[in-house]
C-alpha cells in the first residue's frame, strides 16, 4: 500500500486535484494500522531465532543474523523514521518533502521484503561459503546474498504484496460503490488499482512459473511433494499433471486423482516432453522427504487458483471499463462485478500464506536445505514451556487480529474525511459534496 500512496500523492502534486489528496489521507489510515500490527507481530518472530532455534542461530548466525539485522536497521528503521512525517507532516512540511517521506516509507517497506527473502532464500539454496565444524563461514557475501533462489523469490513476494494490496483496495472500493457511498471517489481508486493490475496480475503468474522452475531445478523433493508424485518420471516423456488428488503417505500412492494429460511438461518447461526427470517421492526414504503432503499439495493449488482468479477478474473488469461501464453513472449498476472484487479482497492474504506453506513446509525435513535438519536446529526446550508460550502468543495474536478487524472496519465504515484542509490551508480549497470532486480552478498564484 505504500506504493499506492506514492502514486496517489504524486497525482495530487501533479494535478492539485483534491480528490487524490483525500485518497492519500484515507488509505494511509489502513497503512498505519497494518504497520502497527506488523510491528507487534513481527518483532517476536525475530526473537524466536534465539529462543526456539538457538542451534540454528549458532550455526548460521555469521550470515543469517546479519541479514536479519539489515532488515531491522536499514528497512524497518527507515520506514519507521519517515512514517511520522508521512502521517503528521501534511501541514508541517513542504509538500515535496512530505512526498519524499512517503516514497521513503514505501521504499523501506519493500526493502524489508528484500532482506527477509534474502534470508529465507539462503535457507533454501545456501551459497557463498561453507560449513566448518558445524558453523557456516562466509567466503563471498554477495554470492550468499544473491543465492540461486533469491532473485525470483524476491520478485514473487514483492509482486504478491502489491497484488494483495491492489485487490484489497479494489474490494473496499467496490463495497463503497455497492453501498452507493462516494461512488465517484471510489471509482477512481478502483480504476487506479485496475490499471496497475493489468501489469501486476499477469506478471505474477509468469514469475510464479519461474519460481516453480527453480523448485524443479534445486529442490526435487519439494517438487515431488507439490505434485504428489510418487514415481519418477524419466526425461523425454510427456507426463500428466495431477490437478486434484488425495495423497496417502502410508501406502505411498494417491488414493484418488484427476489428471490433465501431457500438461506437466508445459507447466514446468513450456513444452510437451520433459528435458529433465521429475523424481518421485519414493526416491527418498520417508525421513528424507516432506510430510503433510496434502497440505503442501493443496496449498500450491489454492495459490495458483487465486492467481488465475485475479487475472480473470482484471481481464473482465478491463472489458467493462472499455465499454464505459466504469463511469460514475454506470458503475453502481455493475453489482456482479463489484461482488467479484469484494470476494477478491481476502484472497491475496490466503495466497501468500499458501505460498509460504509450500515454501517452508515443502523444504522439510531441512531447515538449511541439505545441510541442517530441522530436528538439529530446534532448541532443547521442555514441551510444557513451548506449549505455554505458544498459547500465550496465540492469545495475544488473536487480540491483535480482532483489533485489526475492529479498527479497520471503523476506518472503512467512517469513510474518507472531506473536511480535512489541504496543506497550507485552514479549510478545504474546493467546496465539495461527499464523493464529488471538481478540479481546483483558482489562479495558479492562489493555488501556490
Image: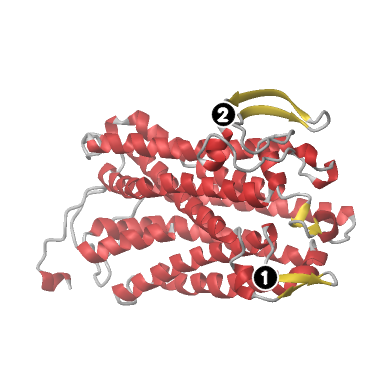
Give the residue at mark 1.
Answer: 128
Name the front one of labels 1 and 2: 2
Q: Position of residue 210 (x, y in %)?
A: 53, 49
Residue 13 figure quarter: bottom left
Q: Nearer the viewer, residue 103 or 157?
A: 157
Q: Which mark is residue 295?
A: none
Task: Please tell me whether mark 2 sits on a helix, a strand or a loop.
Answer: loop
Q: CA distance from mark 1 to mark 2?
A: 38 Å
Q: Along the line of sight, which residue is nearer the eye, 220 or 56?
A: 220
> Mark 2 or mark 1, which is nearer the start of the sequence?
1
Q: Is residue 285 above or below residue 389?
A: above
In the displayed structure image, the side of residue 299 where residue 282 appears, left or right: right
Q: Pick out the residue farthest to the left.
A: 443
Q: Position of residue 258 (x, y in %)?
A: 62, 23
Q: Which residue is mark 2?
A: 262
* Identity of the residue drawn at 69% across and 63% down: 126
Residue at coordinates 81% horizontally, 60% vertically from top-left? 377
Residue at 54% x, 56% y is 152
Does residue 282 lie above or below 52 as drawn? Answer: above
Q: Position of residue 293 (x, y in %)?
A: 73, 37
Residue 182: which quarter of the image?
top left
Residue 211: give x, y in percent of width and height: 56, 49
**Callout 2 environment at 10 Å: few (<14), some (14 to 19), or many (20+)?**
some
Residue farthest toward the front in the current orientation of the protein: 236
Amino acid at each position: 500500500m505504500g506504493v499506492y500512496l506514492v502514486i496517489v500523492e504524486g497525482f495530487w502534486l501533479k494535478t492539485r486535484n483534491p480528490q487524490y489528496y483525500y485518497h492519500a489521507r484515507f488509505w494511509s489510515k489502513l497503512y498505519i494500522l497494518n504497520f502497527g500490527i506488523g510491528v507487534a507481530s513481527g518483532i517476536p518472530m525475530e526473537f524466536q531465532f534465539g529462543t526456539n532455534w538457538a542451534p540454528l542461530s549458532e550455526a548460521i548466525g555469521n550470515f543469517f543474523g546479519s541479514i536479519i539485522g539489515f532488515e531491522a536497521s536499514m528497512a524497518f528503521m527507515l520506514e519507521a523514521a519517515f512514517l511520522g512525517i508521512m502521517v503528521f507532516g501534511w501541514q508541517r512540511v513542504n509538500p515535496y518533502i512530505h512526498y519524499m517521506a512517503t516514497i521513503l516509507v514505501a521504499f523501506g517497506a519493500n526493502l524489508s521484503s528484500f532482506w527477509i527473502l534474502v534470508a529465507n532464500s539462503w535457507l533454501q539454496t545456501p551459497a557463498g561459503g561453507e560449513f566448518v565444524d558445524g558453523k557456516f563461514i562466509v567466503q563471498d557475501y554477495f554470492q550468499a546474498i544473491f543465492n540461486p533462489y533469491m532473485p525470483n523469490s524476491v520478485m514473487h513476494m514483492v509482486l504478491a504484496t502489491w497484488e494483495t494490496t491492489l485487490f484489497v483496495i479494489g474490494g473496499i472500493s467496490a463495497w463503497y460503490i455497492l453501498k452507493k457511498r462516494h461512488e465517484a471517489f471510489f471509482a477512481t481508486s478502483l480504476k487506479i488499482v485496475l490499471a496497475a493490475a493489468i501489469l501486476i496480475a499477469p506478471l505474477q503468474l509468469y514469475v510464479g512459473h519461474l519460481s516453480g522452475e527453480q523448485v524443479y531445478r534445486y529442490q526435487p523433493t519439494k517438487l515431488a511433494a507439490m505434485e504428489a508424485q510418487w514415481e519418477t518420471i524419466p526425461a523425454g516423456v510427456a507426463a500428466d499433471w495431477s490437478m486434484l488428488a488425495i495423497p496417502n503417505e502410508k501406502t505411498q500412492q494417491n488414493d484418488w486423482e484427476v489428471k490433465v494429460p501431457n500438461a506437466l511438461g508445459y507447466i514446468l518447461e513450456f513444452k510437451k516432453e520433459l528435458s529433465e526427470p521429475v523424481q518421485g517421492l519414493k526416491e527418498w526414504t520417508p525421513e528424507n522427504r516432506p510430510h503433510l503432503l496434502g497440505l503442501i499439495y493443496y496449498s500450491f493449488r489454492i495459490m495458483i487458483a487465486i492467481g488465475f482468479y485475479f487475472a480473470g477478474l482484471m481481464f473482465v473488469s478491463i472489458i467493462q471499463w472499455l465499454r464505459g461501464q466504469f463511469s460514475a453513472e454506470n458503475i453502481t449498476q455493475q453489482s456482479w462485478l463489484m461482488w467479484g472484487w469484494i470476494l477478491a479482497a481476502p484472497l491475496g492474504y490466503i495466497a501468500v500464506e499458501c505460498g509460504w506453506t509450500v515454501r517452508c513446509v515443502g523444504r522439510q525435513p531441512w531447515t538449511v536445505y541439505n545441510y541442517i535438519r530441522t530436528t538439529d536446529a530446534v532448541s532443547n526446550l521442555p514441551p510444557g514451556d513451548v506449549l505455554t508460550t505458544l498459547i500465550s502468543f496465540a492469545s495475544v495474536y488473536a487480540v491483535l487480529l480482532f483489533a485489526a478487524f475492529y479498527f479497520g472496519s471503523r476506518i472503512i465504515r467512517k469513510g474518507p474525511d472531506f473536511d480535512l484542509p489541504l496543506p497550507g490551508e485552514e479549510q478545504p480549497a474546493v467546496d465539495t459534496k461527499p464523493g464529488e470532486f471538481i478540479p481546483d480552478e483558482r489562479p495558479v498564484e492562489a493555488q501556490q
